[in-house]
Image (cartoon, helix red, strand yellow):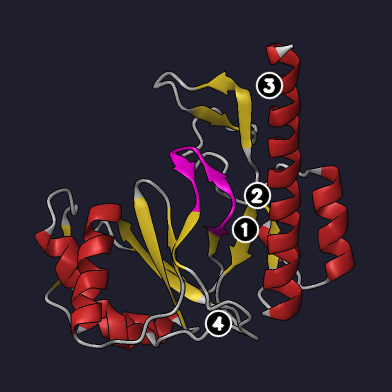
Amino acid sequence: MREILGRRRMFRFRRKARTARRDAAITFAVRWNWPVLPGAGLRATTRTAAGAAACACPDPDCVVPGAHPFDPGLLAATTDERMIRWWWTRRPDAPVVLATGGAAPCAVSLPAAAGARALAALDATGMRLGPVVATPTRWSILVAPYDLERLGELLYAKDSVPSSLRFHGEGGYLLLPPSLADTGPVRWERAPLAGSARPWLPDVEAVVDALVEASTSTPGGGSRLTY
């Protein structure tokens, strides 16, 4: 009897999680006008040599397991509700991928420990932040759209930039909650305000200094790229 009840609870949990991904994708696309698409996802029954869940894409050496577009490709990202419902009806376990850049949000990501330090530093200055996405290993600060030329000018002005920083701009992508990455669940460290017509985003110039400083001063921040 306990086994049957346990299976029923697990079934309800999985069904709720699948519905949550579809509903989240619809909110991002329809209410916020963020183009999204399903990610590759993970193979629950297949593990890598390190014991992590393997990516569902054909590449056995995938460097971002489950956390990237595959079929369809990134260019298929859309805000069309009918397309999104169709995708997640066919693949209810698929993670939600944001196509960054253009009119959509961009992001800067860094290791979780550095991310926590950066947010504390920005909060201390009274900086207004938008949504922050977190996995067990990395945090991503969403920012207003920027182009590569603008980003290049910002980084060129720095003496050096830690290699652990990643910039998700035009042509990039980012997993959004409530997806599942190979390192664990994707969640909001700073959630969008409830009922937001569209979440507010800071300019990249407003946060990049704190992110560079936090990554530089945190162990494991990676090597420095000199400009």
Residues in magenta? 175-186
Mark 3 or 2, nearer chain start:
3
- Disc 1 to disc 4, C-alpha distance: 17 Å
| Residue type marked 2 | Gly
Whether the residues at callouts 2 and 4 have beta carbons within 8 Å, the answer is: no
Marker disc for residue 189: none
- Name the residue tied to disc 3: 6
| Residue type marked 4 | Pro
Q: Quadrant of residue 189?
A: bottom left
- Disc 2 to disc 4, C-alpha distance: 22 Å
User: Given this view, does label 4 or label 3 mark the residue nearer the observer?
Assistant: 3
Q: Considering depth in this image, is 226 or 109 the residue closer to the camera? A: 109
**Image location (x, y in percent) of residue 164:** 26, 56
Residue 64, magenta (yes or no): no
| Residue type marked 3 | Gly
Quarter of the image for the C terminus: give it.
bottom left
Asked if 52 appears above or below 17 in the picture, the reply is: above
Q: Assess disc 3: are there few (<14), some (14-19) or many (≥20) residues with their C-alpha within 10 Å of its C-alpha.
A: few
User: Given this view, does label 1 or label 4 mark the residue nearer the observer?
Assistant: 4
**Image location (x, y in percent) of residue 72:** 75, 52
Q: Is residue 155 visible?
A: no
Q: Is label 4 in a helix, a strand or a loop?
A: loop
Q: Quadrant of residue 36?
A: bottom right
- Name the residue tied to disc 1: 97
On screen, residue 129 versus residue 176, left or right, reads left
Residue 182, magenta (yes or no): yes
Q: Is label 2 in a helix, a strand or a loop?
A: loop
- Name the residue tied to disc 4: 199
- Name the residue tied to disc 2: 39
